[in-house]
Image (spheres, rainbow, N blue to C red):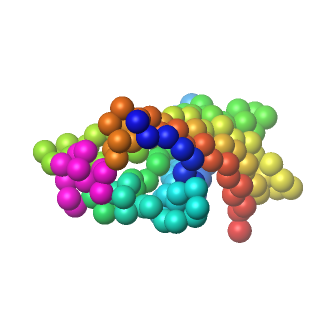
């Protein structure tokens, strides 16, 4: 059984639609360009990708999949609090989309002119490198509107 601490990084965007999306405010977003590092700061992304290739029988998997916000109405309340689901998928060897990770995001709109978003994402998945091991990714973020 494997254990220990690893670090993750990535880029992120969030789009908020205050005007439409049927009867509520919608949020969409993604964490992309994801990388994983061991406790000593060594980039181990290639081993994570290799594990995904093996687990899902698809040598074409070349990156850690984007962690996507599930889009829908009602994810922003009148206080600027946001919450919703996140997940990532890969295409397996049979050509089917398979969920790899799932979790939640929680965030707040803030700043003068509502130009900042601060929050946290918590997602978990089976570690494709080690059968029976669950990986939990917890990350904080601060986004600023340019």
Query: Toward which corner of the image does residue 112 lie, by quadrant?
Result: bottom right
Question: Does residue 73 show up magenta in the picture?
Answer: no
Q: Is residue 101 left or right of residue 13?
A: left
Residue at image position (30%, 57%) is 50
Labels in figure, total = 0
Q: Nearer the viewer, residue 29 or 133?
A: 133
Query: In this view of the protein, can residue 75 be seen by the observer?
Result: yes
Q: Is residue 76 left or right of residue 13?
A: right
Q: Outermost residue toward the bottom?
A: 146
Q: Outermost residue toward the left?
A: 94
**Quadrant showing the N terminus:** top left
Residue at image position (25%, 53%) is 53
Q: Is residue 69 left or right of residue 15?
A: left
Question: Does residue 55 show up magenta in the picture?
Answer: yes
Residue at image position (44%, 61%) is 44
Point out the stretch of residues depicted in magenta.
Answer: 50-60
Query: In this view of the protein, can residue 100 be seen by the observer?
Result: no
Q: Nearer the viewer, residue 25 or 82?
A: 82
Query: In the rendering, at what x and y percent does residue 30 appear?
Result: 51, 52
Residue at image position (49%, 65%) is 43
Q: Outermost residue toward the front?
A: 1
**Quadrant showing the C terminus:** bottom right
Question: On screen, 74 above or below 97?
Answer: above
Query: In the rendering, at what x and y percent does residue 59 appear?
Result: 20, 59
Query: Toward which corner of the image does residue 126 lie, by quadrant?
Result: top left
Question: On screen, 55 above or below 81?
Answer: below
Query: In the rendering, at what x and y percent does residue 19 appear?
Result: 62, 44
């Amino acid at each position: 059984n494997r254990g220990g601490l690893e670090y993750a990084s990535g880029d992120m965007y969030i789009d908020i639609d205050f005007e439409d999306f049927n009867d509520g405010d919608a949020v969409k977003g993604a964490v992309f360009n994801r990388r994983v590092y061991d406790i000593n700061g060594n980039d181990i992304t290639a081993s994570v990708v290799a594990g995904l290739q093996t687990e899902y029988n698809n040598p074409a998997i070349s990156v850690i999949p984007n962690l996507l916000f599930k889009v829908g109405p009602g994810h922003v309340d009148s206080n600027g609090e946001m919450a919703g689901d996140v997940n990532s998928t890969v295409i397996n060897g049979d050509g089917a989309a398979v969920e790899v990770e799932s979790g939640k995001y929680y965030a707040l709109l803030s700043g003068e002119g509502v130009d900042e978003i601060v929050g946290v994402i918590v997602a978990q998945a089976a570690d494709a490198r080690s059968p029976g091991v669950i990986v939990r990714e917890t990350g904080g973020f601060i986004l600023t509107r340019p």
